[in-house]
Image (spheres, grey):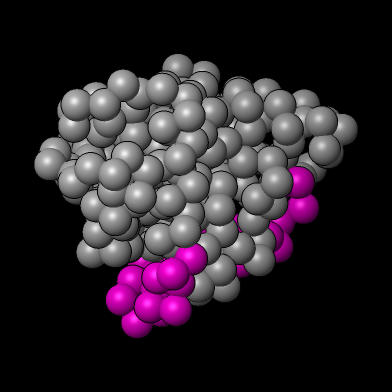
Amino acid sequence: MTKKRLVLWDIDHTLVDFTELGSAWYATAFTAATGATLRVNPVFGGRTELATTTDLLTANGFEAAQETIEALFKALVAESERAAHRFPAEARVLPGAAEALTAFAGHDGVVQTLVTGNLPEISRHKLAAFGLEEHLDLEIGGYGTLSVHRPDLVPHAVGLATAKHGTGFEPGEVVVIGDTPNDVKAALDNGAVSVAVATGHFSAEELAAAGAHTVLPDLADTDAVREAVFG
């Protein structure tokens, strides 16, 4: 029998590395949204964009009103669009990412989408720069606009996938792949399988301590990634 899996990918430090680009957008976007100068920088680490933006506004002396949050989102998307031509030269695909996406696309019963802290538009920009969107259904993902709590993104994506494909995905058939303890928590809080990759700011030991079912050094060994997903 073909094993059914819903694979929910993180983006940053899991599939791609945009370290020097993403942080730089916030200063310009913050000024565009508020008219003020950014004094306290954002904190990421696997958090959702809604959480990051809410805390960023508060830390810089602004009320995290919905209108201001939406203005900052819009400004961040505009910065991403302006920088898109630089992505291929200044960002990079992480080892094995493209191969893993392609490998799972060849499995009947596997649906691949995103659970990411990124905004939907920025997710598309980052992936399209390297052709990584081809095997991902971006319409059924869980994105950083949905909640300040990352675990909330998983059932949202599962619900959309279930509705689109007309079949339910049991918790053990849902696999969350990411590089932070927050990715691990998002999986565990929903009874899903956690596959963690130590390609970001957290060590393999820290990811294991967070409770990941499998920890990989990276995605370079496609067979190891496949084994982690299918068990």
Q: Residue at x 32, y 40 (%)?
A: 34
Q: Is residue 20 magenta?
A: no
- Residue sitting at the far right: 166
Q: Is residue 88 magenta?
A: yes
Q: Main secondary structure of the magenta part?
A: helix
Most foreground residue, 119 or 178:
119
> What number of labels is visible?
0
Q: Residue at x 66, y 61 (%)?
A: 135
Most foreground residue, 194 or 1:
194
Q: Image height check: is 221 above or below 172?
A: below
Q: Image height check: is 43 above or below 218?
A: above
Q: Residue at x 71, y 26 (%)?
A: 159
Question: Measured from the top left, where is residue 218 in percent x and y?
Answer: 33, 58
- Residue sitting at the far left: 39
Viewer can see residue 121 = yes
Asked where in the image residue 73 lies, by quadrant, the reply is top left
Most foreground residue, 226 or 56:
56
Q: Image height check: is 201 above or below 210?
A: below
Q: Residue at x 14, y 39 (%)?
A: 40
| Quadrant that contains the N terminus | top right
Q: Which residues are magenta?
A: 81-110
Question: Measured from the top left, where is residue 177 in percent x and y?
Answer: 45, 43
Question: Measured from the top left, where is residue 58 in percent x and y?
Answer: 24, 24
Question: Measured from the top left, where is residue 67 in percent x and y?
Answer: 48, 29
- Residue sitting at the far front: 35
Asked where in the image residue 165 lies, by quadrant, the reply is top right
Asked where in the image residue 128 lies, by quadrant, the reply is bottom right
Viewer can see residue 208 = no
